[in-house]
Image (spheres, rainbow, N blue to C red):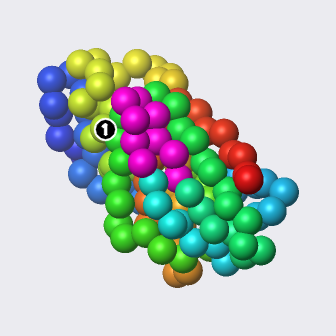
Amino acid sequence: MQGLLKGNCRIAKSVNPIMKGEIKYKIGFSDGEIVSYFREQNNLTVKIKAWNDKNLWVSFSDVVGVKDYGIGDISNFVEGDGNSLFLETVLCRVYDSMPEKPPYHLFRFLDLDGDPCLEIVAVSQIISED
């Protein structure tokens, strides 16, 4: 794969992201809606109105990247496999030389067409409800 170099960090020219897996919660994300999100220092919290009108809160820690394609209705919440141009670009901003296994993960909320509507690069996530 050809790429661009930024310092000692390799950024791929084109990467087709593959999903690592669906992130499951007892209520489920299908037919939900992202109502809002807010960031405070290195933490990001996403508020979701679930299909049953309950509020779900997804809190991300040590956030280093956020990309909003237009929030709204969602079909799923997944973790990417690390093969993403957005993830690589963000990590190249964090590191001068890419470590073999960085602690960051790519999390994606998918819209009704299965495309990302919100991407977050963070160390971890926790789901809660009220």
Work out whether residue 28 or residue 4 is closer to the camera in this orientation and state it.
28
Q: Amino acid at mark 1?
A: Val
Horizontal arrangement in the rendering, residue 98 relative to residue 124 (left or right): left
**Residue drawn at (51%, 24%), measured in percent from left and top?**
103
Task: From the top left corner, tell me how far across and down residue 42 is, in percent.
Answer: 40, 30
Note whether 20 is above or below 34 in the view shown. above
Note whether 56 is above or below 64 in the view shown. below
**Residue drawn at (54%, 76%), measured in percent from left and top?**
73
Q: Is residue 13 magenta?
A: no
Q: Which residue is mark 1?
A: 90
Task: From the top left corner, tell me how far across and down residue 79 is, in percent.
Answer: 59, 49
Horizontal arrangement in the rendering, residue 109 relative to residue 55 (left or right): left
Q: Residue furthest bottom?
A: 113
Look at the image and tell me whether residue 104 can be seen: no
Task: From the top left corner, tell me how far across and down residue 91 is, in percent.
Answer: 33, 32
Q: Is residue 44 magenta?
A: yes
Work out whether residue 92 or residue 118 is closer to the camera in this orientation and state it.
118
Horizontal arrangement in the rendering, residue 127 relative to residue 17 (left or right): right
Horizontal arrangement in the rendering, residue 19 relative to residue 56 (left or right): left
Residue segment shown in magenta: 38-46
**Residue drawn at (74%, 53%), measured in percent from left and top?**
130
Q: Residue furthest front?
A: 130
Residue at disc 1, secondary structure: helix
**Residue drawn at (15%, 23%), measured in percent from left and top?**
7
Look at the magenta stretch and give its main secondary structure.
Answer: strand
Q: Residues within 10 Å of mark 1 (few under 14, many from 20)?
A: some
Note whether 78 is above or below 31 in the view shown. above
Work out whether residue 70 or residue 96 is closer to the camera in this orientation and state it.
70
Work out whether residue 127 or residue 100 is closer to the camera in this orientation and state it.
127
